[in-house]
Each structure stands twice: as structure tokens, then as C-alpha cells.
Image: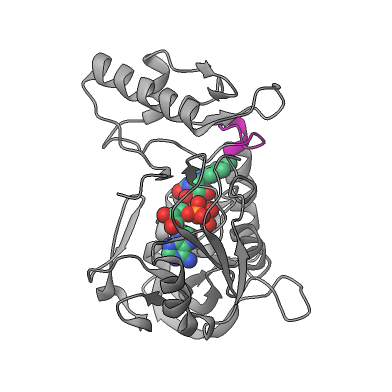
Amino acid sequence: MNIIDRPALAPLTTLGLGGRALAEIRLERPDDCLRLPDVLAGFGGDARVLGGGSNLLIHDGDLPFVVLRPLFGAKTPDNRPAEPEILGEEDAPDGRRALIRVGSGMRVPHLLSWCGKRDLAGLEGLVGVPGRLGGAVAMNAGAYGCSTAPLLRSLDVFTPEKGLRTLTSEGWRAEYRHFSLAEPCAWYMSVSAVLSLRKAEPGSVLAAMKANFLRKKSGQPVHERTAGCVFQNPPGQSAGRLLDAAGMKGKRRGAMYFSPMHANFLVHDMKCGVPGSSADALALIDEARRAVRDKFGVELVMEVKEWSSCPC
Ligand SMILES: Cc1cc2nc3c(=O)[nH]c(=O)nc-3n(C[C@H](O)[C@H](O)[C@H](O)COP(=O)(O)OP(=O)(O)OC[C@H]3O[C@@H](n4cnc5c(N)ncnc54)[C@H](O)[C@@H]3O)c2cc1C
């Protein structure tokens, strides 16, 4: 466990926004969780779990919480990217499947490239998703017909109420871009997951990833500073199309603007000479919500997680 005092959070996010937290606690070994309750109590107790920071809008200023950074399974002891552990195989109606254990700190692009080389299918819709495995589970991230939760066989989690343990599928609830534990808890942190991946034809997984990435790149501003889609798609509709029709494409406040390429992506223009702010981001998000509500009567729900400076 490594504790950093008053870290700046903006550099830990893809959107590049956020003030300073009370502390950052980096966790690399499951044993580190045992010390967490005492360490957190010393800071006042409120904690937020940060993965790759690719789905976060963090407020500016002083933030009254401690940031936990689960880096389990990210690196080997000699500082190289770690690999998933192959546990075995299982039979399923769609063929043989491999069971692998992945630390929640493993970067999703690294995991995908590992799977592609081994023809293990299931995650190829996540190509271009820049987070870590723990964030992909927590968001039930997905695209192009794939999502993370259906591939989960078990999840090792830490909660302040019950400590560290292993859950199976009765232990969680997953829906479109939503994942929560079945039991009440103040917060949870996933430590590692066992995933079940289909053994596919040689080359087919890499080919699917390539096709998905070309599709993503042609329609989304993948090279800009964003946090992915701001809003969830309402049932049967596309949030991007609603925002476009409501006139939000290209709308700007300071350094923040809705992408002219895809209206559901809020971009931080880091080269415009004006510092980006969460206040500008939130004002634009409010404006977008109102515009869609007024024009279509649809209430957009945030997909991006907002970390507020309000202690309430
Ligand atoms: C260019 C771009 C493209 C994207 N494309 C997609 C896409 O196609 N599909 C999609 O679904 N998303 C997409 N996203 C959004 C984002 O990448 C995903 O939601 C991703 O899974 C978030 O992972 P993260 O590790 O960055 O999580 P963070 O942003 O760090 O955290 C997101 C949430 O997960 C929680 N969390 C993180 N780690 C843990 C953990 N170990 N235990 C418990 N909770 C945890 C956090 O507390 C927070 O609530 C995109 C983002 C970008 C920038």
C-alpha cells in the first residue's frame, strides 16, 4: 500500500478535470485491503474507487474524500504489465470456454490484446475502451453487442462492512451500464474477477477487434480528451441523435464542448488557452439535458460518474 497526500486528480482521468482529494491510496496486493479500514478511519472514512478514470467527471477544488486506486494485477514485481492467470476450461452450449483470473487493475487494452492473441472471445466490443478491468465491471461496459457482466463467473470484492471475499452471480445485479452488489454497502472495490471467454477460430477475435475499432474511430472522437458517452442511451433511442437534434453538437463553454463528430461526447480542449473546468462541463451537461427534455420530453440519465465536492 502506497499513500499519496493531496493528489491532483485531473491527471488521473481521461477528461482531465478534477481538484485535489485528501489522499490517494494505491493498492497492489489483496492483503493491502486488510489495512484499509484503519487507514480510511484516519482520513474520516469517505472513499471513492478510481480505475482508469475514463468514465469520470470530477469537480474542481478541494474534495472531501480519499481515492482508492486498485492496481491489483496491473504489473509484475519487475514492473512489466501482468498477464491474466489461466484457471482451466468449461463446456458451454456455445462450445469450450476458458476461465481466466484478471486483477481489477489490469488495463482493458492490455487484456484485449492478450485475449486476441489467444483467440479468446467475449470482450472484443470493448476495443477502444481505455479503462481498467475493475471499471469495466463497475460500469458493465460494453459496445457492439458485448458487455462485461455476462462474462463474469466470480468477483473478489472488498467492502467496508464485510471485508474481502468472493461473490458469484447471486451476489451482484447488472443491467445496461449498471453494476451493483446485491447486498447493501457504502461502497465496494473489486480486486479480481474470473471471466469465462469462448475459444474462437484462430484470428477471428483479432479480426473482430480491428473491425470494431475502425467502426468506433469513424464515429467517435477517440483521440480527444473525453470520458466516453456522457449520457446513457434511453430505451430504444440514441442519446447522441437526440442531442444532435436538440442542437448540442459543437456547443462550447470555455474549454469544454460537445463533439461535432458525436454529440454525446463532451471534449476538453486542452490547447485553447483557457483552463477547462468542471463548472463549464456541468453547465453544458445541464443545458443538454434541458434541450432534450424540452424538444423530446426525454429525461437523459448520466452515464459518466460525477464526483462532487459536496460532502452530502
Ligand atoms: C474514448 C472513450 C471511449 C469509450 N468507449 C466506451 C464504450 O464503447 N463502452 C463503454 O461502456 N464505455 C466506454 N467508455 C467509458 C469508460 O471507458 C468505461 O466506462 C470504462 O469501463 C471505465 O473504466 P475505468 O477503469 O476508467 O473506470 P473509472 O472511470 O475509473 O470509474 C468508473 C466507475 O467505476 C468505479 N470503479 C472503477 N474501478 C473500480 C473497482 N476496482 N471496484 C469498484 N468500482 C470501481 C468508479 O468508482 C466509478 O464509479 C469510453 C471512454 C472513453 C474515454
Query: As rendered, which of 268 and 310 lies closer to the eye?
Result: 310
Is residue 27 inside the magenta stretch? no
Q: Viewed as shown, does residue 232 lie left or right of 121?
A: left
Residue plotted at (63% across, 39% down): 214
What stretch of residues is rendered in magenta?
Answer: 216-225
Write down the quadrant of residue 124 in the picture: bottom right
- Residue 62 visible somewhere in the drawing: yes
Residue plotted at (23% across, 71% down): 183
Q: Viewed as shown, does residue 148 lie left or right of 256?
A: left
Write down the quadrant of residue 268 in the picture: top right
| Main secondary-structure element of the magenta-colored stretch | loop
> Residue 161: x percent and y percent?
30, 77
Here the colouring is: one colour
> Residue 219: x percent and y percent?
56, 30
Look at the image and tell me in which quarter the N terminus lies.
bottom right
Is residue 218 inside the magenta stretch? yes
